[in-house]
Image: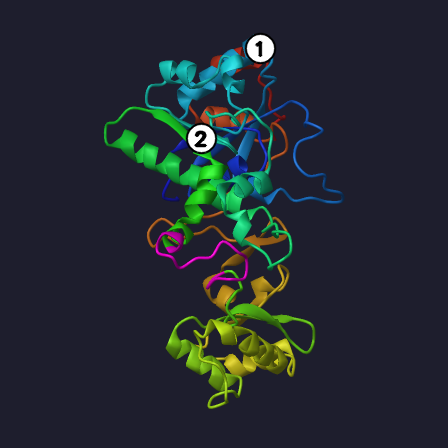
Amino acid sequence: MGVLSGVRVLEFEAIGPAPFGCMLLADMGADVLRVDRPVAAGDLGPKISGKHKNLTGRGRRSVTLDLKHREAADAALELMSKADVVIEGFRPGTMERLGIGPDAALARNPKLVYGRMTGWGQTGPLAERAGHDLNYIALSGVLSGIGRAGEPPVPPLNLLGDYGGGGMLLALGVVAALFNVQRGGAGQVVDAAMIEGAAQLGTTIWGLIASGNWREARESNLLDGGTPWYDSYRTRDGHYMAVGAVEARFYAQLLDKLGLAGADLPAQHDRAGWPILRERFAAVFAERTRDQWCRVFDGSDACVAPVLGFSEAPAHPQHRARASFIEFDGVVQPAPAPKFSQTPSAISRPAPRRGEGGGHALRDWGLDESEITRLCASGLGFAPEV
């Protein structure tokens, strides 16, 4: 029984951030029912070959509806009337054209929280334009600070726009709006835009700019690889160690562990001396393997950690101690987070096939057999139940 147990979420099929936000809600105990298209769209998201596990789709049940038909849209409104939360990730105006936008839904269910996930937001000159994570973080300003000097900005996977600035922001907004409803407030629309979420992730940088402590050039600042004591270094076996020794006392431990304590080196904050420090650090790190350096820094506060691959990370003792990764449905994956002391989160089920579990979900949502039959006549479908 998670912290959101009893909360009913109606999710409309999408890609990227909206499913990720729903995954967070499902992990925390919300009952998420996904409305899928009857047939998968052929051009949604990246093309993935081989066996693909849709991990962000975990914790749901599914029904199918072809929302292009009026009867199906009416069925969707009926489901909205039973939900606490609706989440959709279509372009602005799409749900309105289908007759199931916020006005129609809130008229049926005044306490409904209507979550909308887009890249550019519901308004503005770019609102109806297509885009992906990289486009959104580019316009937010954040992408400009990621990468090496003199080279193109580096895509930080799709973590800053889709997930950190998108799905997590959406989930936070939905939970806050739910809390407001529980305190007697009205339902409302949550307009989550990845461009704004990415900008919020960079709030600290705007503070540094305002105080004159940030240069608009990559590798010129504290946290962008500009300093030799906040960067990654190649080891003898081709791996890397990440160094984050910002504070003076941690920097002193770094020098000690590298065997450079007392060496004739520029001061830590002597910007002119940073190339010299970087060269010395690189030469020393290249003398040993990653595992050897792990042993050297074990137990220290030098703020040095190995750069682990995705396949390596789950085996690290810190993750094992906290069960940060689990195996579910035969797949190793991040465990639900954060951890709650009284209402622990859990993965309830793997991602459903189209329509899987839908019949049981409808009954759990309080629909009787006559209502289910009526909705099915309107186009709602679900897989045969065992």
Residue that carries the numbered disc 2 in the rendered image:
9
Residue 377 is labelled as 1
> Which residue is painted at 29% across and 24% down in the image?
186
Nearer to the camera, 373 or 42: 42
Three-letter code for the amino acid on which mark 2 is drawn: Val
* Cα–Cα span, label 1 and label 2: 23 Å
Q: Is residue 90 above or below residue 50?
A: above
Indicate the secondary structure of the residue bearing disc 1: helix
Question: What residue type is disc 1 on?
Answer: Ala
Do we see residue 369 in this rendering? no
Q: Could you tell me which residue is drawn at 48 percent across and 14 percent down?
A: 371
Q: At which x and y percent is residue 344?
A: 39, 50
Does residue 223 appear left or right of residue 183 in this picture? right
| 50 is higher (above) or lower (below) than 15 | below
Q: Is residue 219 magenta?
A: yes
Q: Position of residue 379 (x, y in %)?
A: 59, 14
Query: Where is residue 307, by image quadrant?
Result: bottom right
- The percent coordinates of residue 107 (x first, y second) are 37, 14
The magenta-colored residue range is 208-223
Identify the image quadrant of residue 380: top right
What kind of element bears circle 2? strand
Q: Earlier in the sequence, mark 1 or mark 2?
A: 2
331 above or below 118?
below
Q: Residue at x 69, y 44 (%)?
A: 52
Which of the numbered marks, if any, corresponds to residue 287?
A: none
Q: Would you call the spot at circle 2 few (<14 residues within 10 Å), some (14-19), or many (20 or more)? A: many
Classed neighbour count for the residue bearing mark 1: other residues with Cα under 10 Å, few (<14), some (14–19), many (≥20): few
In the picture, the quarter occupied by the C terminus is top right
x and y, in percent, of residue 76 in the image:
50, 17
Q: Main secondary structure of the magenta part?
A: loop
